[in-house]
Amino acid sequence: MTRLVKELSRLPGIGEKTASRLAFNLLNRPRDEVIALAEALLEMKERVGLCSECFGLSDRPRCQICESEAREHDMVCVVEGPADLMAIERARSFNGVFHVLHGALAPLDGIGPDDLKMKELLARIGEPPRIRELIIATNATVEGEATALYIARMLKPLGVKTTRLARGLPAGGDLEYSDAATLAYALTGRREL
């Protein structure tokens, strides 16, 4: 039991008390439910990887969004992580495709452009540019703002229309915790950088 509590408390947002509650809850569940949970975790770990195009999560080489012919492939929304992509998808206000950076610039933590999917973003844009608009949807944090400015400056010489999500998202907040209405408003009111 102690080992399970220790492992659960490693998860983000799960402290020791919550981990203990979860462990006791699992202890009281039928064996087949606990096995189903364990199998689901293992299956996720073995089958889910990164989409070869947008770097979002997928159980296939290319995700459903990148595969979809109904999406606007010349409109790319850049997000920090897969949870941000899912938050924007929940808003159902965006019909383009995504590019997941897997982080934000944080020089004090040693995270620079080479640690993110920046080269892949440039390759995806192409020269001459193959996209009509790039929407920067990084978090409203110091790191997110620095990342947005870096991308905007990087794309300026290419003549790519670059927009940023409108305010309305809380400063210092993460996209994955925003409600669908706020995200829909932010996407609608985006502005050019």
Image (cartoon, rainbow, N blue to C red):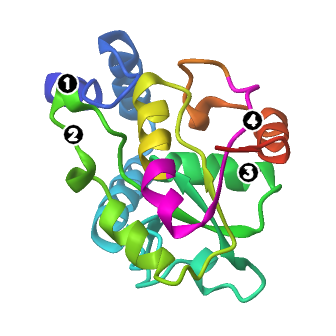
Q: Is residue 150 magenta?
A: no
**Name of the residue lying farthest toward the front:** 157
Q: State the extent of the magenta-drawn residues as a range.
A: 152-169
Dot 1 corresponds to which residue? Answer: 108
What residue is rendered at 37% in x and 40% in y? Answer: 104
Q: Nearer the viewer, mark 1 or mark 3?
A: 1
User: Answer yes or no: do the residues labelled 2 and 4 have beta carbons within 8 Å?
Assistant: no
Q: CA distance from mark 1 to mark 3?
A: 33 Å
What residue is rendered at 21% in x and 55% in y? Answer: 114
Q: Amino acid at mark 4?
A: Ala
Dot 2 corresponds to which residue? Answer: 111
- Which of the two residues, 68 or 146, is positioned nearer the viewer here? 146
Number of the label disc, if any, that sits on residue 166: 4
Q: Earlier in the sequence, mark 4 or mark 3?
A: 3
Q: Earlier in the sequence, mark 2 or mark 4?
A: 2
- Which of the two residues, 62 or 107, is positioned nearer the viewer here? 107
Q: In the picture shown, does residue 20 fall above or below 118?
A: above
Which quadrant would the N terminus be assigned to in this image?
top left
SS state under label 1: helix
Q: CA distance from mark 2 to mark 1?
A: 7 Å
Q: Amino acid at mark 1?
A: Leu
- Which of the two residues, 182 or 155, is positioned nearer the viewer here? 155
User: Answer yes or no: do the residues labelled 2 and 3 have beta carbons within 8 Å?
Assistant: no
Q: CA distance from mark 2 to mark 3?
A: 29 Å
Number of the label disc, if any, that sits on residue 90: 3
Q: Is residue 156 magenta?
A: yes
What residue is rendered at 42% in x and 75% in y? Answer: 51
Would you call the spot at circle 4 few (<14 residues within 10 Å), some (14-19), or many (20 or more)?
Answer: some
Which quadrant would the C terminus be assigned to in this image?
top right
Q: Quadrant of residue 161?
A: bottom right
